[in-house]
Amino acid sequence: MIRKTVKIKNKLGLHARPASLFVQTTSKFKSSIKVFKDKHEVDGKSIMGLMMLAAGFGTELQILIDGIDENELLTTIENLIERKFDEE
Amino acid sequence: MLFKGISASAGIAIGKAFVIEDEDFCPVKRNIAKDEVKKEVEKFRKAISDTKADFEKIKAAASKHLGKKHIKLFDAYLFIADDPVLKSEVVSKITKELINAEYALYEVIEENAKVFEKIKDEYFRERGKDIYDVGKKIMKHLTGVHKKTLADVKENSIVFADNLTPADTILMKNENVIGFATNQGGKTSHTAIMAQAMEIPAVVGMKDITSNVTHNDIIIIDGNEGVVIVKPDPETLENYHRRLKNYQTEVKELSQFVNVPAVTSDGKKIIVAANIEIPEEVRSVISHGAEGIGLFRTEYLFINRAEFPSEQEQFESYSQVVEKVFPNPVVIRTIDLGGDKLLPYFNINVERNPFMGLRAIRFCLKYPEIFKIQLRAILRASVFGNVKMMYPMISGVDELRAANVILDEVKQELKSKSVQFDENMEVGVMIEIPSAALTVDLLAKDADFLSIGTNDLIQYTLAVDRVNEYVTHLYEPLHLSVIRLLKNIVDAGHKEGKWVSMCGEMAGDPAYTEILLGLGIEHFSMGAASVLRVKKNITKTNFAGAKKITEEILNEASRELLIQKINQRKGH
């Protein structure tokens, strides 16, 4: 199990399109992924959940990944966030 | 019964109502037996896969007809329909609470959508609607009740709907639709754009028209007046058949002017251009025989969205218009934002009097970084055709110079990066504030051209808010003060050898063509729908004669006598 804090860097935050990309990525992996914002916890494979976090620019999110491909999933997701979901 | 709305596309049509109902979203709760659980869950899973298949189909059609940009929304819809949390919550409700799939879905959607309602950020809060939209589509498959869709539309139909999105119209049989009427929407809504492209009438923003009309009702839709008549009496119907015929005759007669240059009876060549709000209007500009675009408003890029448009997005949008209109010119107006068009993604204080507040060039001079992005995009687009640019709401020479300083900075920057642009792009000012009209002799020295915005100029000169019903009768384009200001502007511009255009509503009203020609205006710009009527009037007017009338009225103090004189001349 791995835990990591990430910061949303694209201007609009996790709106519909980045959330779609997020889910598209996480769904490809076997590991489970949970995303926390303050006290809220959502499934990282649920677009509905991710959009509900209303994670705007600069929001810090905790990510908890558990499963056989957890390291790869973390790297891929971190990369996606770092690349600002290819938006800018 | 007559209903009024916002006129979104011109024309008159008589046909039958085709009502697209909104899907219901309040199923009946039914308790199920334990051995029914499997069947309900299966039914739900089938509805999910059918919904996904629908979205895939619409997505494919959308990417073919609308381009890749429009398919993002359908991707999000697909992921919502496939959401593991949504699915497991519904399945768990069916299994644990022993209720039917419809009701389980209803509860899950409601619960989740409620969470969105509490979000402070408007953009994220709006996403709750996406959850609802998808929920409704799944429900449609669950209940098996297939409401009418635009794929089934019959001949001679006037389509009624709450609102129409690209997803609704993509599968429509265009040839069967002769008009649109919607509860929601404004002049730039999807319905308006569709209707204009199809050249059929549309009336939008009709509030609850769908609840006042039933399938197959006889309908008259008048897009010129923004009116829909449901089940007209025989007299009205006959009257409208006549109007329709007259309208068709007029359209046919005016169509002769499409390729005719606007030349007065004594041989003076006048330019008649069109105003546009969105790039999609270019088609109509060309089909109406306008000679270029005299006012390209750019606010469409900035409103109804969640962030500022990038330089690249602006550049693509401008250059696309510029290329299509070439070799005719396009006058791009820098943003007139602020005022009543506050952006949800940019925090500026709510103002008590936004029309006289921080808007247009004032906004741009306060936030030069935002302004520069647009200037770069316009300059880059300038090599794709014949581009001119103008600043709105200029109040005097200092503002024009301040804006030009920023423009020069941007030009230097582009040069240093070897980015190409038209170094001789003309830069003009809108004259729409009395202070500019009164110091126009100085403005005309610095500006390459002047463009008169009559809507604001009249409103500010007369201190009349024309949408205020109590004073709207005082909004008089022929007020002597206005006529004198116009004369002052035209003369000052011509004295400096600059061209003077009028792009306000006054330019598009055929009733004023003669007097405007008399004032010396040689460039007109107006909504595409008015172009042919004004062209026709120009060809019938004697330029020298018009000048004489105008001189006569410049000292006519009585508004009544002034209007009488004009009408007499017109009646001659």
Image: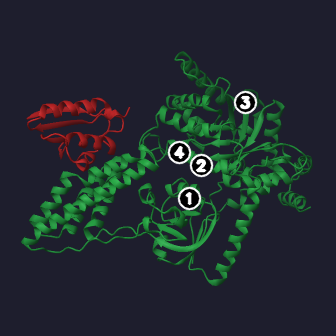
Chain colours: A red, B green
User: Between B479 and B331, which is closer to the camera in this rendering?
Assistant: B331
On residue B81, the disc is none
Q: Marks 2 and 1, how far apart in space? A: 11 Å
Q: Marks 2 and 4, how far apart in space? A: 12 Å
Which residue corresponds to the image point at 42% horizontal and 43% vertical from the top-left?
B69
Which residue corresponds to the image point at 31% horizontal and 52% vertical from the top-left?
B77
Dots 3, 2 in contact, CB < 8 A = no
Residue B517, visible in the rendered structure: yes
**Secondary structure beneath disc 2?**
helix
On residue B195, the disc is 1
Same subunit, tags 4 and 1: yes
Q: For mark 4, what is the residue?
A: B300
First in sequence: mark 3 vs mark 2: 2
First in sequence: mark 2 vs mark 4: 2
Chain bearing mark 4 = B
First in sequence: mark 3 vs mark 1: 1
Q: Which image quadrant for residue B510?
A: bottom right
**Secondary structure beneath disc 4?**
helix
| Label 2 CA crowd tier, 10 Å (few <14, some 14–19, many 20+) | some
First in sequence: mark 3 vs mark 4: 4
Same subunit, tags 2 and 4: yes
**Secondary structure beneath disc 1?**
helix
Which residue corresponds to the image point at 56% horizontal and 64% vertical from the top-left?
B203
**Secondary structure beneath disc 3?**
loop
Q: Marks 3 and 2, how far apart in space? A: 26 Å
Residue B197 as seen in the image, left or right of residue B133: right
Q: For mark 2, what is the residue?
A: B281
Q: Name the amino acid type tagged 2.
A: Glu
First in sequence: mark 4 vs mark 1: 1
